[in-house]
Image (cartoon, helix red, strand yellow):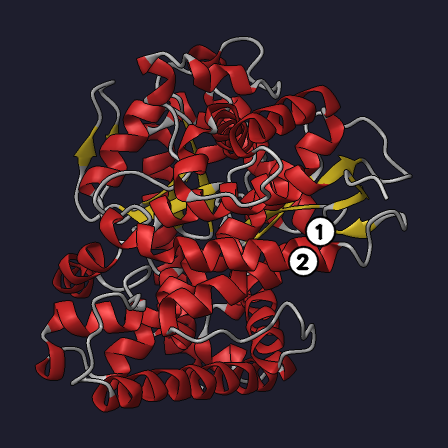
Amino acid sequence: MLQYILVLLVVVVVLTAQRIKTNKLRKLHEEIKTQFSYIPFIGHAHHFLGSSEDRMNRIKELAYQAYKNKHGIVNIWLGSTLYYGISDPDAAKLVLKYNLDKGPLGRLARHLIGNGSVFASVDTWRHRRRILRHATAQKHTKNFMEIFERNSNVIVQQLARVAGKGDFSCWDFVCSCSMDSACETIFGEYLSIQENSEHPFEQAFIEYFDNLSVRTLQFWLHNDAVYRWMPVYRKQVMARNIIHDFVTKLIQRRKKDLKCSQHENRNNKTESFVELLMKYSGGDNGYSDTELLEESLTLLLASTDTSTTAACFTLILLSQHRDLQEKVYKEIHSVVGDSGRITLNDINKLEYLDAVVKESMRLYPPVPIIVRYIDRDFKLPSGLQLCKGSETIVNIWGIHRNPQYWGEDAEEFKPERFLNATPQQLSAYMPFSYGTRNCAGYRQAMIFQKMILANVIHNYHIEPPSSYECENPLRVKFVLMMKHVHDYKLQMRSRVQN
């Protein structure tokens, strides 16, 4: 009996201390408090229950609330953790520049990618960032253009199966193209995923991240001991094992091929990312097999879902703005003509397409929020002090629509903004994050997107689905990344007259 009383006393003391700390910080931050209702011990967590669309709507509301105070910040409590929702670009840049720890949520992704650079601890990331930066340098991007071009031609061929046949989701086509391109650039091997929609690797990859998104957004599943009792855990482990086994085989094949061809002249041979990682980490004395697996999976994650999401949103927007779509088509045709082949030199000339992609990513950034842990008291120029032990939610959605920077028409799709964007606007644009821990492969992601879009638009008219109703903004949901509620449904018609 005494044992139970002692346990109860400990629980009461812990909860009381937590309540005192919470109340103190709530009073300290009265000027940036959220309008959401607060419940002791759970804070504002109940507002983030519901559907994935409901959660995205809460993220939007946090942005609109933050616009109303001088700091551009609003605070929320999820349990005993204080979060600062930042929709001011200047505050966001400082936080992203000086606070590099991605917080406890990054731990969940390590189940798949281990210490891969995206979610690694700060010390591990610092050790690896130089190697990753060299491997993703611009000089290597040119070498991948043939891969991007070939795969974008395959998606044009695959779309012929559905063109003129009514509504379909463009997601599956773009995702398969993205996966083929990523695997060929990373591992030097073409997997023909676009021709094989049931490829086990792609299926496992999709299943894993669907389950991870569920776990991330349901805080009671963050505890490993609890999660292991859930039926989904076994599925998650099976998907991870399929991914790890497949990628490990690709890496070993690449290493074997390199040994067999070490005496051959490879001057004209495109080096895969795995080869570049091996080279820049020290060759035979460089990255271990585990480190190659982790960084390969990191690059695969960064170069598939993000690029697919961004390209699909652009296609949806162009289907709804036919006049702008025709403007893009005319630009492509003026550069490429009837040859049908689009090169890197051509891509660099497509200024209006570049503006369209940037405006699409402004309105619909694939990663709408970035979480960072505050490891020390941190004072902003506005005078607001962020407290050690708290976390920040850098609201990219909110920053990209902040009317103070983008004007009263910030919600409108206007690619012309990026043809003559002001320095103030460019400072409020961060679709690939900001600072030294931003997306390392953003150059490749932009070129790949533009290559797919240019080829698709050059060959097809893109139209809204038959059930289309004008939506501004589009209905979106939050599942690790921001996705379209209606699954990117549209129609296409061939531009080629038979």
Q: Which residue is mark 2?
A: 173
Q: Residue 226, percent across and down?
A: 52, 78
Instruction: Work out whether 350 lies above or below 132.
Output: above
Q: Are marks 2 and 1 in contact (CB under 8 Å)?
A: yes
Q: Residue 26, percent across and down?
A: 38, 34
Q: CA distance from mark 2 to mark 1?
A: 6 Å
Q: Residue 415, percent across and down?
A: 54, 20
Name the residue rendered at 42%, 27% in the picture: 87
Q: Amino acid at mark 1?
A: Cys
Residue sitting nearer the eye, 291 or 11 = 291
* Residue 120 shows in the view: yes
The N terminus: image quadrant: bottom left
Instruction: Work out whether 412 lies above or below 165.
Output: above
Q: Which residue is mark 1?
A: 170
The residue most toward the front is 339
Classify residue 366 as left or right of residue 86: right
Residue 162: quadrant of the picture: bottom right
Q: Residue 317, percent across and down?
A: 67, 32
Q: Amino acid at mark 2?
A: Phe
Residue 297: quadrant of the picture: bottom left
Mark 2: which secondary structure? helix
